[in-house]
Structures are given as structure tokens and as C-alpha cells.
Amino acid sequence: MKFLKLFLLLFIVQTQAQQGGMWVPSLLKGMNESEMKNLGMKISAEDIYSVNKSSLKDAVPQFNGGCTSEVISPKGLILTNHHCGFDAIQNQSSVEKDYLTNGFWAYNMKEELPNKDLEVTFIVSINDVTKEILEGVNALTLETEKQKKIQENISKLNLSFKKEAWQENRIRSFFEGNQYILFVIESFKDVRLVGAPPSSIGKFGSDTDNWVWPRHTGDFSLFRIYADKNNRPAEYSEDNVPYTPKHFLPISLDGIKENDFTMVLGFPGRTQEYLPSFAVAQIQNELNPAKIEIRDAALKVQDGFMRKDNAIKIQYASKYAGVANYWKKWIGETMGLKKSNAVAKKQKEEVIFKENVAKAGKQNEYGTLLSDFEKNYVDIKDYALARDYFTEVFLRNTELLSTAYKIYQLEQVFNAKGEQAFNDRKNNLLSSLKDFYKDFNPTVDEKVFEKLVDLYVKKSPKQFLANDLININATSLSSDIYKNSKLVTYDQLTNLLTGDAKSVIANLNNDKGYLFVKQAADQYLKQVLPKFDEINLKNASLQRTYMKAQLELNKKARIFPDANSTLRVTYGKVKGYEPKDATLYMTTTYLDGVMEKYVPGDYEFDVPKKLVDLYNAKDYGSYGENGKMPVCFIGTNHTTGGNSGSPAIDAKGNLIGLNFDRVWEGTMSDINYDPAICRNIMVDARYVLFIIDKFAGAKNLIDEMKLVHPKKK
Ligand code: ARG
Ligand code: GLU
């Protein structure tokens, strides 16, 4: 019995250890492929990435730089998240045609809506170019010289590496600069809106449910790629035709059950999995708490106004969501780092690292790495804090201050480049500010200013505060500024900016709001940022050496490169988890849960009547499962921001879901992935089909897809 337990434990540890990581698709053969097969995958690494034939990667373009999408029909139909298509949907909307509220469906191709500035990017090939990029670099001693040489090599290879005329080369650094990879890419610029559910489905649960499991959001939207007559990228034209993909994903109607294999292909943005313990402790104990406290204060003020005043709610909803997204993520991340003992875990790894360095006789090369890190993180602490305070208070969360900062940069442009540059920038600024002031409410912002400036003077490191600011009273300062500053309204600001550069600058320097920002910004740019950058560069160089050492000394370890917005594969299983003592979360949510959360008229939890009717009639077509309609599910795939819209793929290469979030308890996975608790959240593909078919009646779209039953013989 005891043995059996031990065996089971070992087995669990092993299968858990095989998960996590974001892997480069061209390098899966060997370890990854065999792990994936152990987890149940039935296709091969060659089916995921191949240079010789079409493969899964040909169906997974990056969506407009920050998200992922997947091709789901032979006519270039793509699927991504509602929150990834949000701007496009919003831009297509007007008071009469409110697609955010009511949804949008094209019932034939003529109704599809072209979008300005929207593109998707396919990866054509992945090429290791480390040798070419590092050529001549090691002979140099100064870090700055090395970086210069690397940039030269990159520019040279970008020009010479063979590609077609309509393609581009893109070189990215991996393993902190220990490896370089060149991607040949193809960007399509005619991408049209095809379908979006109402926000009450696509954004159901909004901020309250964001980052949280159990989740019930139908976070999807549909677009179509158009190409020229030769199937190549082209600017928008009426003559363009639907793109014929090299590969598209069939969609499984068979659904998922616990422990099924899943993988996610996509473009994860940024992770920091190899930080030393000192850095993790600093994030957990200093930087995250400071940023959370600032955003907490800003959000409380906004929320108070939004709940009382519908006009303010409309003005601030999207801004609020933007600020709240990472605020909530940092809270989850901080709790998760503590709960998973991330710092202690790193410390243990560092002890082993030191032993390995000694064993390998590499003290000369790596012996001082950790103590250098330790010193640097002590040195950088106050600069890093001061930088976060300035960024969060002045640049991110107080609108008057961030506007004033843009104008401050205008004065700097004049000082550096003269009148012409000043005027060009001024005109750009004026047009963007016009939009900004439409949704600016000085009454709300004055309260935010008061709370945030108070935190800034009381809590950011005192030694960097301008002398005049140390003893200010934030309440009287804010009422003074919002009464007297010309930055409070667009009209006064335009007046202030009228005239030649010299007189504009003279006027600006009479404005209290402007002067306040100028004082703080001057101080920040002189006393904080240069020193921060200097220590940060040292840390980057140490991090590169640390990475090199780990790769060298630990040849067998599962070491994957941190996310860098390039195409990656992550894999795992459909799996529930235990968020806290005596609580077990299951893998799948159902439409029943949507109805449990339903609050008629609520801005987060309202539900369209049609959906209620379908639910009452249990009219799920072939998409339901035992009389229930699945909505979302979770798995152990290691994802991060940028993976939004990524396809969740089954053992045979079919689409089973659409990634859109992570669970709160596991958001520390950007720093410390723990397979016991880190889960990604996906919309079930069957819910997407159900909404398109039964809710929207867009049979035209269903008809062009390939629906399959991989589990049936
Ligand atoms: N947490 C998800 C992702 O970063 C979804 C964000 C959009 N949804 C929202 N309620 N703000 O990024
Ligand atoms: N919602 C995120 C995105 O927009 C994905 C969630 C995550 O960070 O894992 O990319």
C-alpha cells in the first residue's frame, strides 16, 4: 500500500513536471514530442511545424500585434477573442449601429466590414541565426559595444536573408540573448469583421469575473482575411478575395473531459521565469504592492462615480477595465508567489546552482553572479520604486497629469529640435487630445489626483522628490489645479497651445498644473531614470550570463526561453484544481452557470433574452452535451498575455477551444509556473458554434467550417 502511494506520488510529480513551458515550434522534436505523446498527443512535431508541408503553424497568425487568432475555414475565416476584436468592433459602432451592445453578424461576404489598421501575421519559417548575429561579439569587452555589434549584424542579416518580396524578416533574441531566431513573416492588411456576439455574451462577467474561475464568458469574435488575386497580402481593395490558407483547423464537436491532452499555439508576450530570488522578492514585497495600492485608490474613486452616474459609467468603462486588468492580475500574482513560496524555491535552486558551478570548476566565470545580482537588486530598489510611482501616478492613472506630461515632452522637443518639430508634434497632439477630452471628467480626475498625489508624496522614496513637493497638501493642491489650470478643458488647452513655440512655452510655464508635472518630471528624468537604466542594463547582462550558465550546467533540464511575442507551443491537460483548502474546481462550466450569475439590467451580468430562451428550450443542436451546454474549460497550458485568442487544440490537431485568460490563483505563472495551480481558461469551441448557429443564425459561417467527430470511430 505504502509503495503504491509512493509510486502514485512519483507518477503525479512526473506528469506534473512534464508540463509548463512555452516552446519554439521548430524545436519540438525529441524531448517535447515525447512528452506530448506521453500526455496523449496523436500527431507529430512535424504536423505542428514543418518547412516542407502545411502544418498547424500555418493556421495560427498573430492578431494585430498583441493577440493570437486561428484560421477555421478554407476561405480565410479567423477566430479570436472578443476583447482582441474590441477596438475594431467599437470603431464600427455608432449610436444607431451599436455592435458592442447588440453584436454584429455578416450573413454573406458583402456584409463583412473592412477595418483600418488591422493586420494578421503568419509565420512562414523559423531559422536559428545565433551564429550570424553573435559573430564578432565575444571579442568585444564593453557591453555597449557588444550591443552595437549585435544591432549591426541584425540589420545586415535582415537585408540579406532570403525571402519573397511580400514577406519580411524579423529577428528576435531568445534566452536573454544566448540565441537568435529569424522569422520570415507575412502580414495581411485587409482583415474584415465577420461576427461578434453582444458584450453581454462576449464580455459576460466583465471585471468582476476577469482572471477568475469558474468563468462563463463567450469571449470570441470572427474576422476574415482577404488577399489579392494571387493569394498574397494586399492593402484593402474591393477586388481582394478571401484568403486561401495553407492550413485551417477542423473543429471538434466531441468536447473534452478531464485529463484530455491539450495544446495551445500562440504569441505569448512576456514572462520572467529565470529571475534570481532577489528580484522575485522585490516584485512580491515592494513593487507589486506599491502599484496595487495606487491603482486601488484610482479605481475606488472611478467606481464610486460610475455607480452613481450613468454618463460617467459610459465615459470610464473602457478606461476602468484597462486599469483594473493588471491591478487584479498583480494582486493574484502576489498572492500566488507567496502561496507557492516562490522566493524560497528560487533560493533553493540558487544553492544547487552554486554547487553545480563549483563542481564544474566554473567559479571564474559564474562564481560571483548571484552576489552581483544581490548587490544590484539592493542598489536598484529605490530607483525601481520611484520609477513605478512616477509611471503609475503621473503617466498611467491621473489623466490630467499624463496629458500634462505629453505637453512637457512637447517643450522638450522644442528644446532639442526646434520650432518645426514642435509644431508637427503639437498638431498630432491636438488631434489625439480632442478624442481624449470627450471622455475626460475633471470632477472624477480631481479626486483621483488628490488620492494618488498624496500617495506619491507620502510613499515614493523621499530622496528623489523635488524639494517643493515634500510637504505639499494634495487636497489643496488638487482643488487649486482643477480650478485654475488651463489643462482642465480642451478649449482652454487649445488656446494655451496657440501661437509660436516661445509664447506657448511661456504660457505653459504660467500654468499651475503644467508646472507641477514639469517639476516632478524634471526630477524623475534627472535623478531616477538614468540610474535605473544603468543598473538595469547591468542586470540584463547578468541575466544573460545566468541563463548561459543554466543552459550549460543543466543540460537535461526543461529550460524554455521566456516569452517574447513569438510563436510558441504550450501543452498540458484539461484539469481542475484546488484553489484553497477543501475546495475543488471542476474543469468545465455550463450555460446553467450563466443563468445562475444572470442579473437583469446589470452592466456585467445581464444576458440577452434570446440566450435565456434557448436555455429554457434546451435548444443546443449538436453542440450540447447530455442536455447541457458547455461554456468554458481550464487546462494546464502555460500561457500569458498575448495568448488571447490562441487555439486550444486536441490530440489530433482539431480546435476544441479558444484561450482568453488565466485563473487568479495561478497568475504568478509569468514568474513561477506551478502545474498544481496554474490554469489557462478557454471558451469551449462548441459554445462558439452554438452562439454563431443557434443564437445568431449565421449558418453561412457554420457551413464553411469543417466540423469533426475525432472521438467517434
Ligand atoms: N484578463 C484577460 C487578459 O488580459 C482579459 C482582459 C479583458 N477583459 C476585461 N474584463 N478587462 O488579459
Ligand atoms: N487576456 C490575456 C490577453 O489578452 C490572456 C490572459 C493571460 O494573461 O494569460 O492576452
Image (spheres, rainbow, N blue to C red):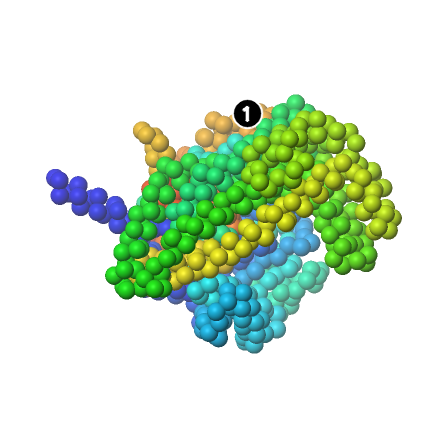
Total marks shown come to 1
Q: Is residue 622 visible?
A: no
Q: Residue furthest top?
A: 308
Q: Is mark 1 on a helix, strand or loop?
A: loop
Going 66% across and 30% down the picture, which residue do you hit?
472
Q: Which of 591 and 641 is in front in this view?
A: 641
Going 69% across and 42% down the picture, which residue do you hit?
519
Q: Is residue 234 visible?
A: yes
Q: Residue 574: give x, y in percent of width and height.
A: 36, 44
Q: Indicate whether 492 appears above or below 151.
A: above
Q: Indicate whether 477 appears above or below 325.
A: above
Q: Residue 685: give x, y in percent of width and height.
A: 47, 46
Q: Which of 357 and 629 is in front in this view?
A: 357
Going 52% across and 27% down the picture, which residue do you hit?
598
Q: Indicate whether 510 appears above or below 36.
A: above
As drawn, is 656 to the left or to the right of 90? left
Q: Residue 150: give x, y in percent of width and height.
A: 52, 69
As drawn, is 618 to the left or to the right of 115? left
Going 67% across and 52% down the picture, which residue do you hit?
115
Q: Residue 621: give x, y in percent of width and height.
A: 47, 40
Identify the residue position indicated by label 1 in the image.
599
* Three-letter code for the amino acid on which mark 1 is drawn: Val
